[in-house]
Amino acid sequence: MPSRPQPLELCASGARRVGEPLFGTASRVDLWLVLEVRGAWAHEVEATIEAGSTLGRALQPVLQAVPRSRLLFIKGAPRGQRETLAFYVAVTDEVASRLYHFELESYEALLGIDLFGVLAEEERYEAYRDPRPLFLVCTHGTHDRCCAKFGYPTYLSLARSESNRVWQSSHVGGDRFAANVVCLPEGLYYGHVEPEEHAAFLECATTGRLYPSRWRGRACYPPPSQAAEHYLRQAQAETRVAAYRLWSHRRRGTVTEAAFLADGADGEDTLHTLRVEPVELEGLRGLTCGTPEAKPVTSYRLLEHRETSFAPEIRSAGTLEFHFRPAAMRDYGFIYRLRRETLQGSLDALEMPAEEQSPFLARFDVMRHRLITTGPELAGAVSVLEREAELHLANLHLLPAFQGRGLGTAIVRELQSRARASHRRVTTQVLKVNPACAFYERLGFRQEGEQGPRFRMVWEP
């Protein structure tokens, strides 16, 4: 008599069996659009949003414009239908995360919400700010059976304590770590959360601390930096969510160097620099239940951890002193408003329709920027992409009060010096109607072709 085929191992069971580490596995997300959609969900919820539909017109412009943005569907337990639909917008930032809560009479009401205005922190949306944490438990069984099997009991357990703040969610990433819980707006990922842990888990989450044994990482960091933060917190026995902020993230080959700032009690900041690299661990398991073939387990190991005192490097532009700091999602609104203030005239001159201007102005990667600060004031923002043969000045915007004072010239001259030292050229793109074309020409740039409404400009060392 032929033997029966053995049932395939659940991916979450396999991850537990081989002891796959949780740290460094959170999905990378900066902006969350969380919409109540009742009933069954498709395997990929974003694929159900048609371009010309109400949801498509309301949500797709911001999802396409903002890097690392994500749409999630949510629903409550079958305990009676609510008359309105919940919609949340969460901006995940290590220092200043924020959550907005809207109640919709219908999906058509989404068209009345200016999501770019929400991102820009416009005052009209202040009344929708929600100071309370939100808990999303992935129960998306049509995406992976582990999400339903392990997620739903954990959801029920958490919901009994926080019925108004806990929702079932569509796929959040990492099926094999079910039950997965995401805490918004901070974007804290947890995996393998058990139903009986609900009290301890919620107590940590509502007091600004991590629940270390189930912590996967912060959505606002790339996975290698998540791993570096894990090792830093492990060494310092630190669970306060706000204890550190990421200052830099550099990759050299397979090694990532992440530097975190910690505010010192004596007013002196400490910089923790950690180097990590991926490592293949023993054991095999399926990545998801839908792809059950055995794969090696990969995690990260710590190579180095060093501490130094920190002070920003001060630069000069004539009598004006300034320094740079990395931008984060809390700066998205500033950079968006800065681009609007400095580019509005050019867009009007190009006769760009008003409905196209907001997506154009919002289409930038905040994490590639550095903010230009003069003392306590923000003066502008700059973004430079390093390439093998060139340094590409993607953006340079200064507030009007800081224009014409030599600040822009000092920044470009420094970039030219770096390019000269590395035998590279400097490139940029400028709207044809933008007066900045003359600024770059004075600094030795020449036009090298066109791309739509922009001139491509090049400086050769």
Image: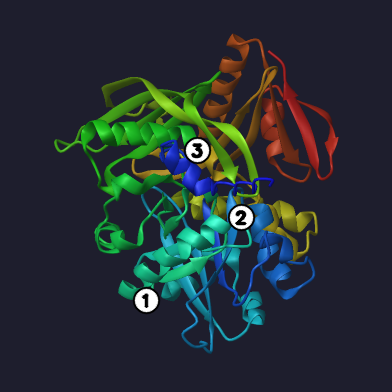
**Label 1 vs label 3, nearer the camera:** 1
* CA distance for labels 2 and 3: 29 Å
Q: Residue furthest front?
A: 1
The number of callouts visible is: 3
Query: What residue is shown at x 36% (from left), y 25% (from top)?
Result: 274
Q: Which residue is mark 2?
A: 340
Query: Which amino acid, mark 3?
Result: Pro
Drawn side of residue 135 relative to residue 341, left or right: left
Q: Position of residue 418 (x, y in %)?
A: 56, 16
Q: Position of residue 329 (x, y in %)?
A: 48, 49
Q: How is the image coloured?
A: rainbow
Drawn side of residue 303 relative to residue 299, left or right: left
- Please determine whether, in this image, residue 344 is positioned above or below residue 213: below
Q: Position of residue 109 (x, y in %)?
A: 62, 81
**Label 2 vs label 3, nearer the camera:** 3
Query: Which amino acid, mark 1?
Result: Ser
